Amino acid sequence: ALGNTLEMIAGGGGISPQLFGADAVGIFGATRRVLILACGTSYHAGLVARYWIESVAKISCTVEIASEYRYRDSVPDPETLVVVISQSGETADTLAALKFAKSLGMNKTLAICNVPESAIVRETALRFVTRAGPEIGVASTKAFTTQLAALALLTLALAKVNGRLSDEDEAMHLAHLRHLPVAVAKVLELEPEIEGWAQRFASKHHALFLGRGMHYPIALEGALKLKEISYIHAEAYPAGELKHGPLALVDKEMPVIAVAPADSLLEKLKSNLQEVKARGGELYVFADAGSEIPQSEGVHILHMPEHYGLLSPILHVVSLQLLSYHAALVKGTDVDKPRNLAKSVTV
Ligand code: F1P
């Protein structure tokens, strides 16, 4: 799916704003603020993109849950680029939020969507169609990784049009993007170990996910996947918030899953993990090749094959998707058709 989505940058050329439509250069050049609207997994993709857009394109970005956006008074700004993200393109709340933003005079709109002929795509000025193919199950998985790839391209296009991307950085980011399918295939090779971990979730009723920075939304997505398909109650927190409440829940019955890339926040994360350990919590750590996490009883560590810099969330989420999938199999739930959920929420 990632290969299909990234096909349009397969050649040797640089990043082209036209990937998003004929008017993209003009719209991106006038963008002073980005507002992302989405629900569920797509909302989590937006939360990752906020880190990218602010750090690379240097444009202020907010992300709102689409099902809430139209029920509050906000201050509309016509220079805002409104980005809606949706796998199906039919989610009623996301469509309504988009129409609401337009009714406030925000007409610079972009859809990131997997279905070209969908209601949401018909409403926007610009569009990027991810080519993930249909999701077989209800829970979004490949839709999420392809949305992130599209959002990384959007970040680079915004940065380029606004003169914030050097040729060297552009070449580096493009090389990373093109290598993504290979990097993800290597993560999939961790499946036997992740399956082994999942066996230990058979008797669990709760789980806690921790991440920091742009991997906090990945922790959120890991918790959502586990809830959706295995019915294990899961919460996600930025690791620095542990001591502000959730630490009270930690005991040996609570598996704590940590996303631990080798980035500038790793040392802080390690001290958060120590707090969990001191309360008898069982830790499952997805580390990067270069993340040195002290091994001890009750600390399980898996090393990701590559440290992937800015695009690291795309690799880390795959390992969490695999964990949820195998936990669901162990629990005996239907991974494709979770109870009470619909593939497309159109009402
Ligand atoms: C949003 C979403 C999905 C979730 C489920 C219900 O859908 O929350 O993330 O997996 O299918 O809807 P979409 O707008 O991305 O199609």
Image: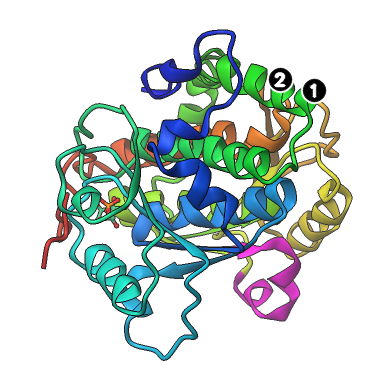
Q: Indicate the quadrant containing the C terminus: top left, top right, bottom left or bottom right.
A: bottom left
Span shown in magenta:
237-249
Note whether 332 is above or below 132 in the view shown: below
Under mark 1, the amino acid is Glu
Image quadrant where residue 238 sits: bottom right
Per the picture, the main secondary structure of the magenta-coloured stretch is helix
From the image, tell me which residue sits under label 2. Answer: 171
Distance between the Cα atoms at labels 1 and 2? Answer: 5 Å
Residue wearing tag 1: 168
Could you say where residue 11 lies in the image, as x and y percent from the top left?
52, 8
Q: Residue furthest top?
A: 12
Viewer-nearest residue: 321 or 142: 142
In the image, taking residue 98 as reference, residue 41 lies left or right, namely: right
CB contact under 8 Å: marks 1 and 2: yes
Residue lying at 80% horizontally and 63% vertically, measured from the top left: 275
Circle 1 crowding by C-alpha within 10 Å: few under 14, some 14–19, many from 20: few
Camera-side residue of 233 and 100? 100
Query: Could you say where residue 179 lies in the image, as x and y percent from the top left?
Result: 59, 15
- Mark 2 vs ligand 1: CB below 8 Å: no
Tell me the kind of residue under disc 2.
Ala
Q: Is residue 329 above or below residue 254?
A: above
